[in-house]
Amino acid sequence: MNYIDIIGLFAGACITISTIPQIIKVWKTKKVKQISLKMFGILTFGIAVWIVYGILKNDLPIIITNSISLILNLTMVYFILSYEKE
C-alpha cells in the first residue's frame, strides 16, 4: 500500500464516519421528521455508483470506504423508513 492509498483511505474514512453521529442520534431518539429521505436515497445511490467505479478501476480505498458508507447509509434509510411511521 502506497501513500496515495493511505490518503484515499483517510479521506474516505472521514466521510464514512461523518454519518455515524446522525445514525446514533436517530437510533436513540427514533425521530426522523427533519431528515430528508430523498437526500439519503440519492446519497446512497451515489455511493453504490462509487463502489462500481472503484471496482472498475480496481481501487481498493474507494471500494472499502464506500462499501462501509453504503452500509451506514442503508442503515439510515432503514431508520427513516421505519421511524417515519411513528
Image (spheres, rainbow, N blue to C red):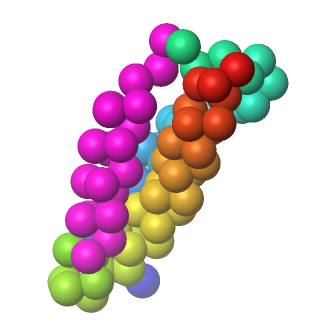
- Name the residue: 20% across, 74% down: 53
For residue 45, side relative to residue 81 (left or right): left
- Name the residue: 75% across, 31% down: 27
> Residue 60, percent across and down?
38, 80
Picture layout, residue 7 above or below residue 41: below
- Quarter of the image where one finds residue 46: bottom left
Which quadrant does the N terminus fall into?
bottom left
Which quadrant does the C terminus fall into?
top right
**Callout count:** 0
- Chief secondary structure of the magenta span? helix
Q: Is residue 6 visible?
A: no
Residue span colored magenta = 34-52
Outermost right residue? 28
Q: Is residue 48 visible?
A: yes
For residue 77, side relative to residue 47 (left or right): right
Magenta residue check for 68: no
Outermost top residue? 34
Outermost front residue? 85
Picture layout, residue 23 above or below residue 9: above
Q: Is 23 in front, or is 82?
A: 82
Picture layout, residue 60 above or below residue 85: below
- Quarter of the image where one finds residue 78: top right
- Name the residue: 47% across, 20% down: 35
Q: Is 76 in front, or is 6?
A: 76
For residue 4, side relative to residue 72 (left or right): left
> Residue 71, percent across and down?
55, 59
> Residue 67, percent across and down?
46, 67
For residue 6, side relative to residue 38 (left or right): right
Magenta residue check for 48: yes
Q: Is 44 in front, or is 66?
A: 44
